[in-house]
Image: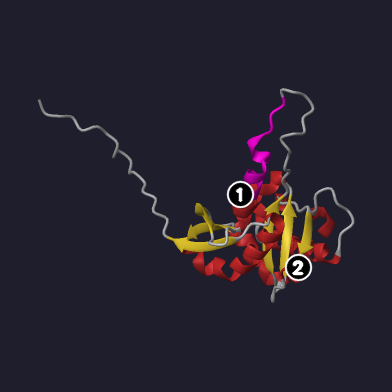
Amino acid sequence: MAANKFWKKTELSNLEQQVGVALTQIEQSLADAKNLKLSSVVDYTAKINAKKQVYLVYIPHPCLSVFNKVSSKLLPELEKRLKATILVVAKRTIESKWVKSHRSQTRPNSRTLTSVYDAILEDLVAPTFILGRRTRVRVDGSKFYRIFLDEQDQAELEPRLDAIKAVYKLLTTRDLEFEFRRDDVFYSKKGASKKVQRKQ
C-alpha cells in the first residue's frame, strides 16, 4: 500500500513506509489527497540537531498544485500520526547558464538558482504565504534574508520556524530571519470603480 504513494519508486526505507502508510490512512478522510504522490523522505533530525523529529518530504513538481490545495489539512494530520515536524518540498532542477545543446537555447527563469531557492522557501512555509523579502548585510559582511509572514498564521508556524531555518540553511546555505506582520491588502468592492458623472 505504501509503495503506491511513491512516484516511480519500489524499494522504500522504513521511514518512507511509515509516511506512505500514514498518507494512505489520511486519504480515507481527505479525498483530495488521493492524487498526491511522493518522491522520497529524508530524516534531518541528526543533521540539524533538532530535539523533535524533522522529516523532509520530496514530492514531484506536477503534484505541487495538489499539495497546495490540501496542505492546511494534510500537514497537521501527518505530524499527528508520525509525531514529527513534516516539511514538504517539490523536486526542482537548477540548470547552468553555460550548458547549452545549441547556441539559441535559453534557460527558463524557473530553473535559475535564485528562482529555485525562492520556490523552496515558499514550499517550506506552506500553507501560509510570504508577504515580503529583504536582503540585509551584517556588520561583519555576512548576508541574511528577512522574511515577512502573515501574522494570522503565527500560532501554527512558530513551532516550525527553527526547523525551517535549519533545513533551508542546509539546502541553500542561506541564513533566514522571520517576522510576522499584518497583510495590508485592500480590495475594491464591486461597482466602486464606476465613474461619477459630473453635472453640467
Boundaries of the magenta span: 105-119
Q: Earlier along the polypeptide chain: callout 1 or callout 2? A: 2
Q: Is mark 2 on a helix, strand or loop?
A: helix
Is residue 129 toward the left or the right of residue 84 in the image?
left
Amino acid carrying label 1: it is Asp
Asked whether 163 falls inside the magenta stretch, the response is no
- In percent of width and height, residue 152 lies at 46, 63
Q: Name the residue under label 2.
A: 47
Q: Is residue 1 visible?
A: no
Question: For residue 52, which quarter of the picture?
Answer: bottom right
Give the residue at x 65% y 58%.
30
Q: Residue furthest right?
A: 11
Q: In this view, does 50 lie to the left or right of 177?
A: right
Disc 1 target residue: 118
* Amino acid beneath label 2: Lys
Residue 86, x across and y down, in percent: 68, 64
Q: In which quarter of the image is the C terminus?
A: top left
Which circle marks residue 144 in the picture?
Answer: none
Mark 1 Cα shell of 10 Å, populated few (<14), some (14-19), many (≥20): few
The answer to which of 67 and 148 lies nearer the viewer is: 148
Do callouts 1 and 2 mark residues in contact (Cβ within 8 Å)? no
